[in-house]
Amino acid sequence: MFFIKKNKQINMNFYRSLKYSVAVGPVLLFILSCSIKPSGSNYVDFVNPLIGTAPSTTISALQHGEDETESNAQVVPYVTVPFGMTNWTPQTKATETKCVAPYYYTDTKISGFRGSHWLSGSCVQDYGSMTIMPITGKLKCQADERASNFSHDTEKTTPYNYNVNLADYKIDVNMTATKRCGLFQFTFENSGEAHIIVNPNSDEAQGFIQINADKNEIVGYNPVHKIYQGWGDKAGFSGYFVVKLSKNSAYFGVYQNEKILKGNTQITNQENIGAYISFMVEKGETIEAKIGTSFTSIEQARKNLESETKDLDFAEAKENLKNTWETLLSKVKVEGTNKDDKVKFYTAMYHSYLHPRTFNDVDGTYVSFNGGKQIMNSGKEDYFTDYSMWDTYRASHPLFNLLTPKVNGQMMKSLFSMAEQGGWLPAFPCWNSYTAAMIGDHSTAAIADAYLKNNIEISDKQYSYLLQNAFKSPANHADYLDGKGRRGLTSYLKYGYIPLEDQVLESFHKGEQVSRTLEYAFDDFALSQIAAKKGDTLHARLLKKRALNYKNVYSVADSCVRGRFADGTFTKDFDKFIRKPYITEGTPYQYTWYVPQDIKGLIDLMGGEDGFNANLDRFHAAKQYWHGNEPGHQIPFLYNYSGQAWKTQELVTQIMKTEYSNQVGGLSGNDDAGQMSAWYVFSALGFYPVAPSVPQYVISGPHFDKITLQLENGKTLTINAKGASSGNNYIQKLRFNGVEYDKTFLDHFSVLKGGTLDFEMGNEPNKSWGTAKESKPFSLSN
């Protein structure tokens, strides 16, 4: 997922500064040489949060990325609880500007440590964030001025602890976290004057900060603003924080730009504001800081801080967070000969489990969706926001459905809560608001996947919101402008596709009519699955018919999708190898294969399996496959539908080797809240959810010798694939619980029962495996 093309506010010089190539060989070589060496037997020790923090060095990123943001994974080395409210990161970029992550590996200075709400791997915005920075010597408050040099040699990153030495100040910084709080240790190597600076990161000259010297605390807030729909409008809430310091001082003040106001205790709604507290420190002295955060109020931030960190020392918090990640990661135990693959695997799991974001306070309190006009309560469950839904419905949420279905159920319940509070089911909810940032209606697909896998129930009221998105547009145009409802639905319902005359102007991504048609057709299919399970035969029939709308933008003469006018004629503006305005972030050829609900129907359009395979072969030969963007993530698995499963095994192996590495440039594009990483996790396990809402996984073959899945229902699935980690990646035979198995897919419910999958792997393809008609995965046209 990328948003850069239409965002005129981006400073392209900044992105050019990130780009590096053979011309800066020493920098490139240094970046490529940076990896971690796991120690001990803990699974968390294999995680390297620096992977993806530098521009991508993978093949498809270099070939297909049109600008620097498309060649950067946009992840940062978060210290955080899985799905934490606030994620903690070193800060090398002091802004909340769209498409600018808080940290880039290629930067050389740290200007603070941020309590961030950046959507990992995205091109959106940080919001409601704050930063804390320790310095020594002369008081310097502005981020660029106070920034310190640092070396990656002194930088130690894990999901539970970040440690670095600020070279300019000789301060050793340690950072860990709870669900809503950050904990810091600042150790001063030299005696003398020191300062701790805190600031809200507002780019709109707004915010508030106050020093409560008698309590050793600094409190404040940073108002949140929207982008996309209602760009620049207030989102109706702020990021609130309470900083508690372990040492008191009578020397403090606030600042605004270069103006330092000694002894003043608060400042509000001005550009570049913040506060500081000064100390005299001894050599080797440590000052600790605990920071509570909330989206509700300062008092709730204080309550979160008290609840999560009272009587909790830094070492204990660090160990708790380590154990939290270890418990999660150990749900999947992989064994093999290649340590680098284990680093890639467990880092991918870590990236997969960063979002969505917990939005409620420890007592369940949160501000209502889309405006924050009411105080709500989620009870004993969590309420989530920040769904990169154009991406994560594909593999991230299916991964949660497999490994952690209970929390995914809460995520789906949160979507319905948004619908109840805002009136419409959101398609891409971020910063607790409607956005219409990307195309499609994929909250429907994510909900369908959970429902069809029996992870959630759907009430009649909740079902009505799903139907409303599929069949109606807001009567009030202001609601449509606010991001409610499907974009271009009127045209879609009238023609069975969105014609080029409908420019879809009331959205961030304008046009893209063919891609919208294809994605709506899939969402219609997913909703038809819900309707059928609920016994609503009328809507099930209507939606299944609409699921075939992909055919309306397919040009048989071109063996490819193509833009179409309202009169039924295809546009002359066509080259299937080049990006077109009716396609989202790609070429017509790349989007042709987005028919996950009906690959058999696509095969028939291409003249049968031989024509389909020849076309797909040509696609790959032309190097059209772009792993760095999500619409093609299902493509490598499509040969299973056309009698050549061995090619899927070959392609997936190639992608895993060339599009992922354990280096800082080792992700091939925006990670998009973990979707890129979730693809790797599934592929390493040996199967992938091509069509969410269909409870099947398409088999590609494991990439470890042994994998053990501890399922949430208490069952264990063991996957044996001797030799897979050392290059034997072609399936020769497969047995499931001792019985020979030649289907090229796994049933979700069979997987949940546990048991043993025994793969016989080899270094040459078995071209006859999985070729029978009954061996092929689900298609609507079967």
Image (cartoon, rainbow, N blue to C red):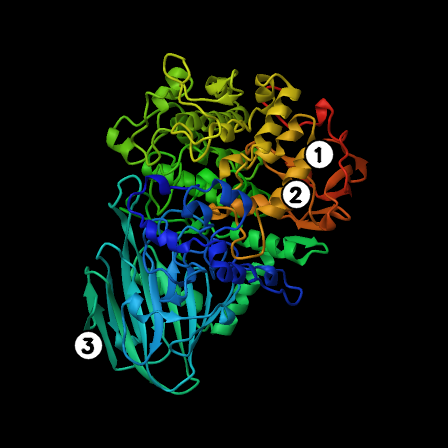
Residue 624: horizontal and vertical position, in percent? 53, 34
Would you name the residue on which mark 3 appears? Answer: 262
Q: Earlier in the sequence, mark 3 or mark 2?
A: 3
Residue 289: horizontal and vertical position, in percent? 39, 73
The disc label shown at residue 646, or none:
1
**Distance between the alpha carbons at the discs numbered 2 and 1:** 11 Å
| 642 or 132, nearer to the observer | 642
Q: Mark 2 and mark 1 in contact? Answer it, CB < 8 Å.
A: no
Q: Nearer the viewer, mark 1 or mark 3?
A: 1
Q: Secondary structure at mark 2?
A: helix
Amino acid marked by disc 2: Thr
Q: Is residue 496 visible?
A: yes
**Distance between the alpha carbons at the discs numbered 3 and 2:** 61 Å
Amino acid marked by disc 1: Trp
| 493 or 730, nearer to the observer | 730
Q: Nearer the viewer, mark 3 or mark 2?
A: 2
